[in-house]
């Protein structure tokens, strides 16, 4: 793993640690939680696909 990848992974884990408690506390209903989780999953997948296409 390159240093850039390691730093990116550390940054993403730190952001997740900061956001996750608030995300879980505001999504106390299961339906709302799954809805928000699916939206975030779609956003992340779109970003990954765009990055993959740019690097090709």
Image: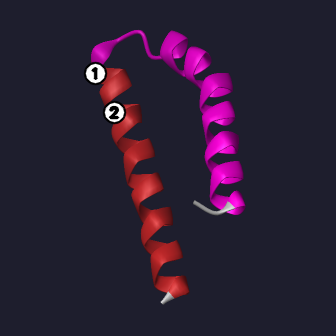
Q: Pick whichever, 22 or 1, lies toward us.
A: 1
In the image, taking residue 41 as reference, residue 50 lies left or right, namely: right
Circles 2 and 1: CB atoms closer than 8 Å: yes
- Across and down, in percent, residue 6 comes to 65, 51
Viewer-proximal residue, 55 or 30?
A: 55
Residue 23, percent across and down? 54, 21
Judge whether 26 appears above or below 39 on screen. Answer: above
Secondary structure category for the residue under label 2: helix
Q: Please, which colouring scheme is shown?
A: secondary structure
Q: Is residue 1 left or right of residue 4?
A: left
Q: Residue furthest front?
A: 1
Q: Quadrant of the N terminus?
A: bottom right
Which region of the structure is painted magenta? 3-30
Q: Which residue is mark 1?
A: 31
Instruction: Specify whether 18 is left or right of 26.
Output: right
Q: Nearer the viewer, residue 31 or 56?
A: 56
Q: Is residue 1 magenta?
A: no
Which residue appears at 31% of the width and 28% of the height? 34
Determine the main secondary structure of the stretch shown in magenta: helix
Rendered image: mark on residue 40:
none
Q: Residues within 10 Å of mark 1 (few under 14, many from 20)?
A: few
Quadrant assignment, res 37: top left
Residue at 70 percent of width and 43 percent of height? 11
- Tell me the residue that label 2 is attached to: 35
Q: Residue at x 41, y 33 (%)?
A: 36
> Quick one: which residue is furthest to the bottom in this view?
56
Which SS class for mark 1? helix
Eyeballing the image, is 18 above or below 8? Answer: above
Q: Residue 20: x, y in percent?
A: 56, 22
């Amino acid at each position: 793993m390159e240093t850039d990848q390691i730093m990116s992974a550390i940054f993403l884990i730190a952001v997740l640690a900061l956001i996750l408690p608030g995300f879980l506390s505001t999504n106390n209903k299961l339906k709302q939680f799954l809805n928000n989780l699916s939206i975030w999953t779609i956003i992340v997948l779109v970003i990954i696909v765009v990055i993959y296409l740019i690097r090709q």
